[in-house]
Image (cartoon, helix red, strand yellow):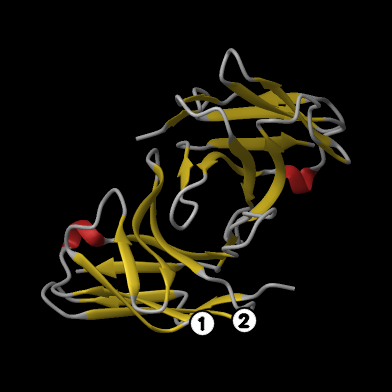
Amino acid sequence: DVKVTQSSRYLVKRTGEKVFLECVQDMDHENMFWYRQDPGLGLRLIYFSYDVKMKEKGDIPEGYSVSREKKERFSLILESASTNQTSMYLCASSSGGQGNYEQYFGPGTRLTVT
Amino acid sequence: AQTVTQSQPEMSVQEAETVTLSCTYDTSESNYYLFWYKQPPSRQMILVIRQEAYKQQNATENRFSVNFQKAAKSFSLKISDSQLGDTAMYFCAFMKHNTGNQFYFGTGTSLTVIP
């Protein structure tokens, strides 16, 4: 079974802090994604990566950066956390090959910025 | 950008009854994929069902089936014999082939199954 894990389920940070959210997948997937989930807005893509060191902006990249130094690990960085970044953050991965395309999700990190 | 619309923010259904969740999408692509995902309260998002646009036959997975109307750009999810464990947020998603095979999600429908 595909497993996607996230470093924390709950996180509380102060405004201005640098925040790291980590995601690890164990199925050798090429693609990895970071979303934020807010009530009434669904899932919005922040960034995705299709290979090691490769990244693409999603729909709401402002205030975020990402890093993918190893295939299994994809990090989301909030350079200077703000209260409007309080949200649920979901990581997902998918195979780059033909056929499946399913995205597998981690359990999420609920981030509160005070 | 692709848009996916779920017009029913909340729905409820009696246990053992049937419920249909709506989803429409906008695209100029001819080849794409559609998905329904389920997110139970405080639990992980999981895939319910997928549909390839080039297949005319509607996908089914046990009690879950879809009504895929390509011309109308409609992709509804039918849940038969609803169970308490079906209580969840349901998200419709669209994917076209591109770098990374990005998904576009709707805003979700919160379904409550009433005992």
Q: Which mark is residue B103?
A: none
| Residue B30 in which image quadrant | top right
Q: Residue at x 63, y 19 (%)?
A: B70
Identify the amino acid type marked 2: Asp
Q: For the point 29% across and 67% down, which residue is it?
A: A112
Residue B15 in percent (x, y) is at: 82, 33
> In the image, is residue B16 above or below residue A16?
above
- Spatial CA distance of label 2 from label 1 is 6 Å
Neighbours of disc 1 within 10 Å: few (<14), some (14-19), many (20+):
many
Q: Could you tell me which secondary element the residue under label 2 belongs to?
A: loop
Q: Name the residue at 52% across, 70% down.
A: A30
Location of the N terminus of chain A by quadrant is: bottom right
Dot 1 corresponds to which residue? A72
Identify the residue at the far bottom of this view: A70
Letter of the chain that mark 1 sits on in the rendering: A
Count of labels in the image: 2
A47 lies left or right of B75: left
Q: Are the residues flagged by discs 2 and 1 in contact, CB closer than 8 Å?
A: yes
Q: Please tell me which residue is depicted at 72% across the width and 36% down the height of the picture.
A: B113
Q: What residue type is disc 1 on?
A: Glu
Residue A70 percent across, percent down from the top left: 44, 86
Q: Which residue is denoted by mark 2 in the rendering?
A: A26
In percent of width and height, residue B108 lies at 51, 37
Q: Is residue B10 above or below residue B91?
A: above
- In this rendering, the answer to whether A90 lies above or below A45 is below
Determine the image quadrant of residue A95. Answer: bottom right
Please tell me in which quadrant of the rendered image residue A54 appears: bottom left
The quadrant of the rendering that contains the C terminus of chain A is bottom left
In this picture, residue B43 sits left or right of residue A34? right
Going from N to C along the chain, the mark reached first, 2 or 1, is: 2
Label 2 marks which chain's residue?
Answer: A
- In this rendering, the answer to whether B81 lies above or below A70 is above
